[in-house]
Image (tube, rainbow, N blue to C red):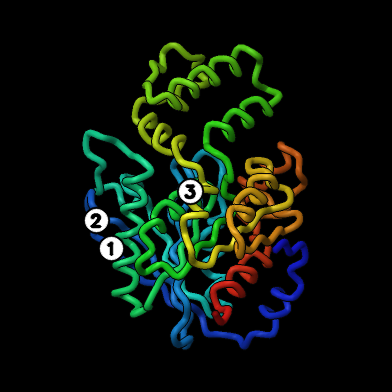
Amino acid sequence: MILRSLLAALALAVASPALAAPVEAELTAHGPGGPLKGTLMTPEGAKDAPVVLIVPGSGPTDRNGDNALGVAGSPLRRLAADLAGLGVASVRVDKRGQFGSAGASFGDAGPTAEAYAADVRAWIDETRKRTGARCIWLLGHSEGGLIVALAAQKPDGVCGLVLVSTGGRKLGDIMREQIRGNPANPPFIVEQAERGFAELEAGRRVDPSEFHPGLQPLFAPAAQGLLMSEMALDPAELVRGFKGPVLVIQGGNDIQIRMSDAERLSAARPGVKLVVIEGMNHAFRTSPAEMMATLASYGDATAANVPTLAAAIADFVKAKR
């Protein structure tokens, strides 16, 4: 079902009784590679609140959604606060090997999608113990959506999925589109990148020194195992394999993930709900669908999230089933 207007959800948010300030507490989950750190935000006075585990996107993105490569303003923490105001608890986490979870290791194998999914499972167990919740809602943003969909293939303790700005095609196809779509990339850069993607899709590692310096971070040796594991996954197939409730949320002005991705996810099986938030970009802010304006909004530390994002999530996880 496609909802292009969220007026009903927004009205629900406005009509909800005001809650006291939420309470935050540090959490530690015992992951396969070591201790994982996160933050539980609980609505004060809200009994039996649904609990959403928030998994961030790719790269050096912390539990608040900030990324030294260009995202400021803590969009994931703002989302958690907005959800708390609507009576929904959340846990937002640092990924293995980064920030508060820097002490957790991947070992010699390096990061993979399967390793990140195992960490999500550890967070489900810890969050259920800490909150007493029967099950946990898994929310993944961007790459995080792929990870939670993979984790949910073992559905014990999972209420359902919320996939925000999540690719609906294989990662290699999305990366090719992004490389080709950047007008700053000359043809030889595009050719090199596509050659590298093809090698990784075939399960073969590449030598970063063979690429233009601007591409070398993309093909860093430590990242290649993760890329290969993610390129092998079809997110729509993962959605098809999970039988619980699924909400797909897509921003109308997202320049990184296309509307066709969200539509492919929502068409994976009957019953998947699609909400399109007009004007929202990949970082949950309102901006024009133009690259420079979008990038500027990413780095704006004062920018608020689109309010209908939290309203749509709260409406979905609180619905009676």
Contact, mark 2 vs mark 1 (Cβ under 8 Å): yes
Residue beneath the point at 63% across and 58% down: 249
Secondary element under disc 1, as helix, strand or loop, is strand
- Left or right of 253 on screen, residue 78: left
Amino acid type, label 2: Pro
Q: Secondary structure at mark 3?
A: helix
Q: At which x and y percent is residue 143? A: 49, 46
In front: 182, or 316?
Answer: 316
Residue lying furthest front in this view?
270
**Disc 2 and disc 1: Cα gap in Å?**
6 Å
Q: Residues within 10 Å of mark 3 (few under 14, many from 20)?
A: many
Residue 146 numbered tag:
3
Side of 99 where 287 appears, left or right: right
Residue behind mark 1? 28
Mark 2 or mark 1, earlier in chain = 1
Query: Measured from the top left, where is residue 167 in percent x and y?
Result: 57, 45
Tag of residue 35: 2
Is 213 on the left-hand or right-hand side of 253?
left
Q: Residues within 10 Å of mark 1 (few under 14, many from 20)?
A: some
Q: Residue at x 64, y 69 (%)?
A: 312
- Residue 62: x and y, percent? 44, 51
Q: Helix, strand, or loop for circle 2?
A: strand
Which residue lies at the image location 68% right of the left edge and 61% below the top edge? 275
Mark nearer the N terminus (1 vs 3): 1
Vertically, is 20 above or below 26? below
Amino acid at the residue labelled 1: Thr
